[in-house]
Amino acid sequence: MQQTVKFVPTSVGTSMLTMLRKVHEQRRIAIFSGPPGIGKTTAINTFSEEQKGNVVVIKLNRTGKTGMGARMVMQKIIMAIREITTDYNNYVYHDTYQVQRQLSQLIGLWAEQMGASNLPHRTIIFDEAQCLSRDAIETLRYWNDVDRCYGPVPIGLVFVGNNEFALSSSKGKKSVISDAVADRARYIEEFDYSCVENDDIKMILEAHGIADSRAISAVIKHYSSSRTSRSLRSLVDYKIPLMRDLSGGGVIDASIVAEALAA
């Protein structure tokens, strides 16, 4: 049975949580990118739970070559907000103008039902944001714009994606983030595996009940190899459960770790 572990304050997780809190408080835009398994999704899920009812997380999937369009994204936001409000209407318009009006009304309802002030703190987070089209991101910024906001109040926007989502363009491709969106962002952070520190791996292991110093050192050495990605997800989802199985519920020592890492 897999052990349930609460949020572990790793370097990436702690950094993202701090920035997410500030973006939410200021109703701004943040852009985060980085490889899988370093703790991005864990951080946004933790923040969402911390701000329950005030934050909506949209899990995205790739649709088409250019990514999900503006209308479909707004439709997904409508369905997500309905899950935390008392709007029980299941119908979503297909006409872009009507979808925009529908979303504006729902944002107003979201603000009112959560006991909001005149300018409530509400944030929408897009996980796997590389699945969004440039047009969708450009449209979304107007829900955050104080001067030309599509909705009754500005909404904080957070875009979290993998390496494809990096702000800089590559191989002549235009970045999915326009200059207008980047200019409005409170944070633009590009993480990589080097951001995962040895102390992060140690904390993860200890949080899962692995305290043997030689075992911890062996895991850190393994994940320091140039041939191994420093993915905390692979450690938590695959290696640690395997260690637990191999130990038969006993102490996970260096020999157990060596067997698990060699598998």
Image (tube, rainbow, N blue to C red):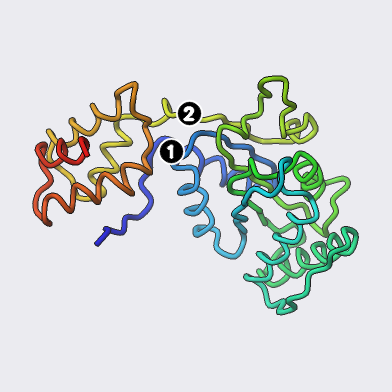
In the rendering, which numbered label is found on residue 38? Answer: 1
User: 158 or 222: which is nearer to us?
Assistant: 222
| Residue ID at (82%, 57%) | 151
Crowd class of label 2 (few under 14; some 14 to 19; many from 20; radius 10 Å):
some
* Residue 195 place in picture, x, y as percent: 43, 29
**Circle 1 sits in a helix, a strand or a loop, which is it?**
loop
Residue drawn at 41 percent across, 25 percent down: 194
Rendering quarter of residue 132: top right
| In-image side of 25 versus 5 (left or right) | right
* Residue ID at (68%, 70%): 82
How far apart are labels 2 and 1 at the CA level?
8 Å
Q: Quadrant of residue 1?
A: bottom left
**Circle nearer the N terminus (2, 1):** 1
| Residue type, numbered disc 2 | Asp
Q: Is residue 66 above or below residue 175?
A: below
The residue carrying pointer 1 sits among few (fewer than 14), some (14 to 19) or many (20 or more) residues within 10 Å by Cα, namely many
x 47%, y 53%: residue: 46
- In the drawing, does residue 251 fall left or right of residue 113? left
- Residue annotated with mark 2: 192
Q: x, y percentage for residue 54?
A: 62, 61
Q: Nearer the viewer, residue 223 or 83?
A: 223
Are the residues tagged 2 and 1 within 8 Å (C-beta)?
yes
Residue 220 picture location, percent across and down = 25, 30
Q: With 177 as the anchor, is 188 left or right in this view?
A: left
Q: Tell me which amino acid carries mark 1.
A: Ile
